[in-house]
Amino acid sequence: MSRIERVALVAASLFAVCGCGPRPIPRVFLPDQPTTLAELCRRYPLAPGQSVRVDRLGVAANASYHFVQLSPGAGERPHLHAQHDLAVTMLRGGGTQWIRDHALPLQAGDSAVIPAGTPHRFVNTGDTPAAALVIFSPPHDGSDQVFLDGR
């Protein structure tokens, strides 16, 4: 199974779990122990004035998983990951996920798959911090990020 097929399978599973009814309160189950979104936010707080926080929660043979938070009004710089596919699942808040030139509104419970080499960025358009679980395949160490805004 290719990397993109594995990421698509994870995303499809997340879509199936979310269903079409009222949005449930997202829960996160980590390999070591179940945890809650509130516990993740306590363990990895956004500092005053901090726009973006990324914490690596764990790594497996073919993927790594990260807890990403953006403060209200904050946005990522446009970038791509040349060697990594990723799946993003919003856990709290929402905003706009830009994939190439397409704006995709995301809110808690929504997921997006971004293949390697695809320009993207997320902007928190809400008035509360946004939080997402991001799964990279293969495991991401932070070095495969190419910024596209010339800074």
Image (cartoon, grey):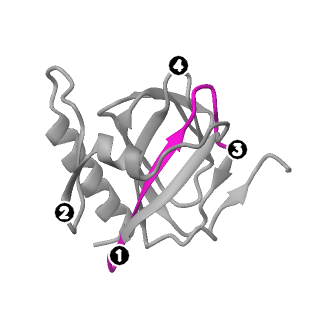
- Tag 4: residue type? Asp
Earlier sequence position, callout 4 versus callout 3: 3
Measure how far apart labels 1 and 3 are at the Cα level: 26 Å
- Tag 1: residue type? Asn
Height in image: 33 above or below 1? above
Earlier sequence position, callout 1 versus callout 4: 1
Query: What residue did someone put label 4 on?
Result: 127
Q: Which mark is residue 33?
A: 2
Earlier sequence position, callout 3 versus callout 2: 2
Circle 4 — which element? Answer: loop
Q: Which residue occupies 33% across, 80% down?
A: 61
Q: Which mark is residue 77?
A: 3
- Tag 3: residue type? Arg
Q: Which residue occupies 30% across, 42% down?
A: 37
x then y, percent, for residue 89: 36, 43
Q: Residues within 10 Å of mark 1 (few under 14, many from 20)?
A: few
Circle 2 — which element? Answer: loop
Are the two marked residues, 4 and 3, in contact with CB atoms closer than 8 angstroms?
A: no
Q: Which residue occupies 35% across, 49% down?
A: 40
Magenta segment, which residues?
Answer: 59-76
Query: What residue did someone put label 1 on?
Result: 62
